[in-house]
Image: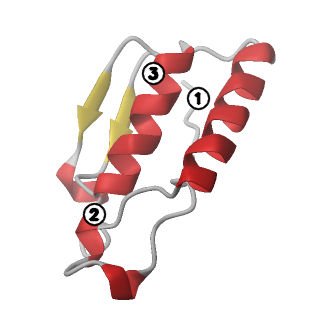
């Protein structure tokens, strides 16, 4: 099994949103994420599953990866939130 960790793209400014969880990707963040996703696809990567935190920007990043064709499945996994612990 191989595991890849991909951080979300560039997000909106913290001061512009009531909570950190609501911050979306900026247009630049979406564009750069799409470029990275396309490059990963060009390298022949294919994921069985993409797990994403409930954070808006993380979900948007996962959706872009899915749209490029890196994985047929995206699932939310709450333990990936910023305040969660996995162990």
Give the structural element (helix, strand or loop) at label 2. Answer: loop
> Gap between marks 1 and 3, in whole Å?
18 Å
Identify the residue position indicated by label 2 in the image: 81
Indicate the position of residue 34 as horizontal and vertical percent values: 63, 34
Image quadrant for the C terminus? bottom left
- Of residue 58 and residue 25, the one placed in the foreground of this image is 25
Across and down, in percent, residue 6 comes to 57, 47
- Residue 2: which disc? 1
Q: Is residue 32 left or right of residue 73?
A: right
For residue 15, side relative to residue 5 (left or right): left
Q: Residues within 10 Å of mark 2 (few under 14, many from 20)?
A: some
> Toward the viewer: 60 or 31?
31
Q: Quadrant of residue 80?
A: bottom left
Up-down relation of residue 43 to residue 17 (above or below)? above
Say which residue appears at 23% left-offset and 44% top-offset.
77
Picture residue at 25% right of the left edge, 76% below the top: 83
How far apart in space, not on screen, are marks 3 and 2 (Cα)?
A: 20 Å
Q: Quadrant of the N terminus?
A: top right
Q: Secondary structure at mark 3?
A: helix
Looking at marks 1 and 3 on the same chain, the residue that comes earlier in the sequence is marked by 1
> In this picture, is 14 found above or below 10?
below
The residue tagged 3 is 66
């Amino acid at each position: 099994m191989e595991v890849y960790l991909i951080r979300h793209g560039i997000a909106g400014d913290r001061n512009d949103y009531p909570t950190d969880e609501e911050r979306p990707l900026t247009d630049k963040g979406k564009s750069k994420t799409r470029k990275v996703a396309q490059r990963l696809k060009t390298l022949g990567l294919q994921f069985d599953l993409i797990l994403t935190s409930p954070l808006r920007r993380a979900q948007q990043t996962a959706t872009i990866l899915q749209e490029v064709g890196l994985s047929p499945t995206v699932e939310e996994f709450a333990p990936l939130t910023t305040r969660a612990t996995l162990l």
